């Protein structure tokens, strides 16, 4: 989801629905340090509801959201791959 607000803030929400709740919990713990970073007016929050992760990116400039969004999704993909390989 991509939306703007009345304040001029841009909000991007990404939902990652995982079938394995343990994988979701491990991924959440891996992303928590990343969520405390605020770079160039862009913030990132991560939360978990059951087996779904919710990533929320906020910023005032849409182009500034692209690098953290892209990097975080790449990190999510790598972590999921590693965790799945460990479970095999």
Image (cartoon, helix red, strand yellow):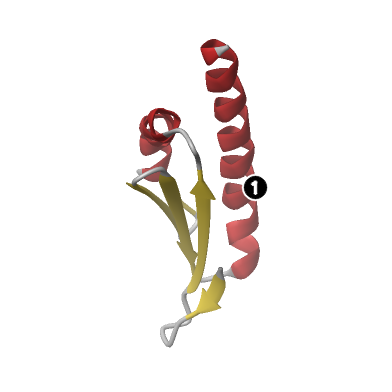
User: From where the camera sits, is residue 85 visible?
Assistant: yes
Secondary structure, mark 1, is helix
Asked if residue 3 is positioned above or below residue 41 in the image, the reply reads below
Q: Residue at x 56, y 68 (%)?
A: 1
Q: In front here: 47 or 35? A: 47
Q: Residue at x 50, y 54 (%)?
A: 15
Q: Residue at x 57, y 48 (%)?
A: 68
Asked if residue 8 is positioned above or below residue 82 in the image, the reply reads below
Image position, residue 21 (x, y; %): 39, 35
Q: Residue at x 56, y 29 (%)?
A: 80
Residue extending farthest bottom:
6
Asked if residue 17 is positioned above or below residue 57 in the image, the reply reads above
To which quarter of the image does residue 82 belong? top right
- Is 70 on the left or on the right of 30, as rendered? right
Labels in figure, total: 1
Image position, residue 28 (x, y; %): 39, 36
User: From where the camera sits, is residue 37 visible?
Assistant: no
To which quarter of the image does residue 34 belong? top left
> Which class describes the residues within 10 Å of circle 1: few (<14), some (14-19), or many (20+)?
few
Image position, residue 23 (x, y; %): 44, 29
Image position, residue 19 (x, y; %): 49, 38
Give the residue pinned by disc 1: 70
Q: In front here: 49 or 54? A: 49
The quadrant the C terminus occupies is top right
Residue extending farthest front:
19
Q: In front here: 72 or 53? A: 53
Q: In front here: 4 or 24? A: 24
């Amino acid at each position: 989801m991509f939306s703007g607000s009345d304040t001029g803030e841009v909000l991007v929400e990404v939902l990652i629905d995982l079938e394995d709740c343990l994988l979701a919990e491990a991924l959440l713990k891996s992303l928590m340090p990343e969520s405390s970073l605020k770079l160039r007016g862009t913030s990132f929050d991560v939360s978990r509801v059951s087996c779904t992760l919710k990533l929320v990116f906020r910023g005032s400039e849409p182009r500034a959201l692209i690098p953290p969004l892209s990097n975080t999704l790449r990190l999510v993909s790598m972590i999921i791959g590693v965790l799945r390989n460990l479970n095999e």
